[in-house]
Image (tube, grey):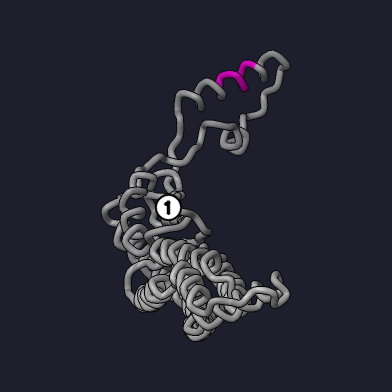
């Protein structure tokens, strides 16, 4: 199934006192360009998160942002820097003595001083928290993949219509090219007649020979066969489970090569017009292929 390279999804998971929230978004890119942002203390989980995302995405610029909130008592514990408190208290006493102030130093004044009371730096238990983070990322990736598949299905439906139009054009080009020998014989006869104004008798055998030579040079049967093969391969690639973007882009190059050759070989006006129409459809498909994983 084809997937779009662009998508967005989020999820949140809570287990015990730990809550993990993640947002995943992606943009077009030729290769997999993955960025994971984790809060301080959880950065060592980055490689494990990247492994989860890489297993679900093969191409595109992907950004995953995680927020982790720990409501456990240890995560909100505080400690006192007694050395700073003693020093600050002595400074306040010295200031009071200097100005003859006998009032006791209030606790609120000490507690409000910077650096005396501070959060206790307790490293998070990464192994205990990983299952919550893993499940949160996995849930977001499921929604993310579903969104990209839905967009891919819309693109596939558009491709199906355009491929049908191309197939019809190939049939018409083949039918038009079947009459090339007659077409060249008639054109040569008319040109020679116009140049000589009927003064010279036209040799039917020579006309037939020249017409056969031109028809052989303009033979596009091989290009028609290859174009049909590319068409079949294109549809198979669309239906395959693996990422299709790169393969479809390559097939489009091959498609264009065949129709450029067809356009240069044949001088038939109807064929030339159909080739222009086909190349227009191929360009529209190419624009959409750039959005596929």
Q: What residue would you read off at disc 1? A: 31
Location of the C terminus (image quadrant)? bottom left
Looking at the image, which residue is at 50% across and 73% down?
Answer: 206
**Whether residue 77 is situated above or below residue 289 in the rendered picture:** above
Q: Is residue 90 magenta?
A: yes
Q: Which residues are magenta?
A: 89-94
Looking at the image, which residue is at 42% across and 68% down?
Answer: 140
Q: Nearer the viewer, residue 20 or 255?
A: 255
Residue 124 position within the rendered picture, expressed as x and y whole percent measured from the top left: 34, 48
Looking at the image, which residue is at 59% across and 81% down?
Answer: 186
Residue 106 position within the rendered picture, expressed as x and y whole percent measured from the top left: 61, 34
**Whether residue 181 is situated above or below residue 71 in the rendered picture:** below
Using the rendered view, name the quadrant where residue 184 is placed: bottom right
Residue 239 visible in this rendered orientation of the protein: yes
128 left or right, relative to 109 = left
Location of the N terminus (image quadrant)? bottom left
Looking at the image, which residue is at 33% across and 69% down?
Answer: 242
Q: Nearer the viewer, residue 198 or 48?
A: 198
Q: Is most of the magenta stretch helix, strand or loop?
A: helix
**Whether residue 77 is situated above or below residue 86 in the rendered picture:** below
Q: Nearer the viewer, residue 99 or 88?
A: 88
Q: Nearer the viewer, residue 94 or 30?
A: 30
* 10 Å crowding of disc 1: few (<14), some (14-19), many (20+): few
Residue 11 visible in this rendered orientation of the protein: no
**Whether residue 218 is situated above or below residue 80 in the rendered picture:** below
């Amino acid at each position: 199934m084809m997937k779009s390279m662009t998508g967005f999804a989020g999820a949140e998971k809570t287990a015990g006192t730990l809550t993990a929230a993640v947002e995943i978004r992606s943009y077009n890119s030729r290769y997999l360009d993955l960025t994971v942002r984790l809060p301080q203390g959880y950065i060592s989980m980055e490689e494990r998160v990247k492994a989860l995302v890489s297993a679900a995405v093969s191409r595109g610029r992907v950004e995953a942002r995680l927020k982790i909130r720990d409501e456990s008592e240890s995560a909100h514990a505080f400690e006192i820097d007694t050395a700073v408190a003693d020093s600050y208290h002595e400074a306040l006493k010295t200031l009071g003595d200097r100005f003859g102030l006998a009032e006791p130093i209030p606790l609120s004044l000490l507690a409000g001083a910077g650096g005396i009371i501070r959060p206790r730096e307790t490293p998070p238990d990464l192994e205990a928290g990983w299952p919550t983070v893993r499940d949160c990322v996995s849930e977001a990736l499921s929604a993310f993949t579903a969104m990209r598949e839905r967009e891919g299905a819309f693109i596939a439906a558009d491709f199906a219509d355009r491929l049908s139009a191309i197939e019809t054009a190939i049939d018409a080009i083949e039918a038009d090219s079947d009459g090339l020998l007659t077409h060249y014989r008639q054109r040569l006869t008319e040109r020679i007649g116009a140049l000589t104004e009927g003064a010279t008798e036209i040799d039917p055998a020579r006309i037939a020979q020249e017409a056969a030579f031109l028809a052989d040079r303009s033979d596009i049967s091989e290009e028609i066969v290859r174009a049909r093969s590319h068409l079949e391969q294109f549809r198979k690639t669309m239906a395959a489970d693996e990422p299709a973007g790169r393969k479809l882009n390559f097939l489009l190059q091959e498609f264009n090569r065949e129709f450029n050759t067809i356009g240069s070989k044949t001088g038939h006006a109807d064929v030339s017009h159909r080739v222009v129409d086909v190349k227009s459809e191929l360009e529209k498909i190419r624009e959409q292929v750039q959005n596929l994983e």
